[in-house]
Image (cartoon, grey):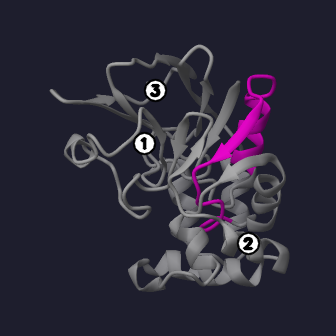
Amino acid sequence: MRYLIISDIHSNLEALEAVVADAAGAYDEVVCCGDVVGYGADPEAAADWVRRHARITVRGNHDKAVAGAADLEWFNEAAQAATLWTRENLSRTNLDWLAALPQGPLEVDGFEIAHGSPLDEDEYIITPAHARRLFGQAGWLTFIGHTHIQGGFLLHRNGVRAIEPLWEMETRREFELSADYAHLINPGSVGQPRDHDSRAAYAIYDADKKRVEFRRVPYDIDAAARKILEAGLPEPLAYRLRLGR
């Protein structure tokens, strides 16, 4: 079985469509690590696609906020404005769907998905020190999101090793999983990467071969940014797409 692993779409339809086209024929099922909405100008289309195509989706912090299940005080001004705008531009069907999304981690055919970390859905796992605390707590393979940084960590009793994101000129890289480690794998952000690479990020997990393939694909950033500005959303949300941060 092959899984399309996506996370942090953030209402970016152009990026989502590019990922789906790039991954065509390479997967059997879709799982999503959360933050379907927020920031971008196409929350309805993004939510529609994930609701219809993903087998399992866990909630992200922006999904919770848009659904009214989280306080906005921890969001910056741009994120707060985007959250309120998104609430006004989602159908009742998709608002109800967001409100009903489960908290991770969830088990999927021998692996888990979460938004932040297996212990706290809102925790950012950015450094080896963050990941080290999860040794003995995380399962053999957990896909996470939240940081918008593609890569992850290998956990072992002797230490933690980072999995590096793709180089600028790479579009794909395979990574073999090992029985000797627990794996925290971040597919990266579809709609708002923050690892200084503006291309949409995702991963394919081949459960039979025990292999993860990290992928990047360019998309029409100008169109996505223009929609944000035309919607009256904060300007930095458009400009940061080109910077990948």
**Viewer-nearest residue: 156 or 62:** 156
Does the magenta portion include 17? Answer: yes
**Viewer-nearest residue: 127 or 40:** 127
Q: Name the secondary structure under disc 2.
A: helix
Q: Mark 1 packing: few (<14 Cα in 10 Å), some, or many (20+)? A: some
Residue 239 position, x and y percent, is: 54, 59
Q: Which residue lies at the image location 46% right of the left edge and 81% below the top edge? A: 77
- Which quadrant of the rendered structure holds the N terminus? top right
Identify the amino acid type marked 2: Glu
| Marking on residue 166 | 3
Is 32 on the left or on the right of 182, as rendered? right
Q: Which residues are magenta?
A: 14-40
| Marking on residue 230 | 2
Q: Which residue lies at the image location 61% right of the left edge and 51% below the top edge? A: 191
- Asked whether the residues under the numbered discs 3 and 1 touch, taking CB atoms below 8 Å apart as contact, a structural biologist would say no
- Asked whether the residues under the numbered discs 3 and 2 touch, taking CB atoms below 8 Å apart as contact, a structural biologist would say no
Q: Which residue lies at the image location 69% right of the left edge and 50% below the top edge? A: 56
Q: Which residue is mark 1?
A: 196
Q: Which residue lies at the image location 55% right of the left edge and 52% below the top edge? A: 192
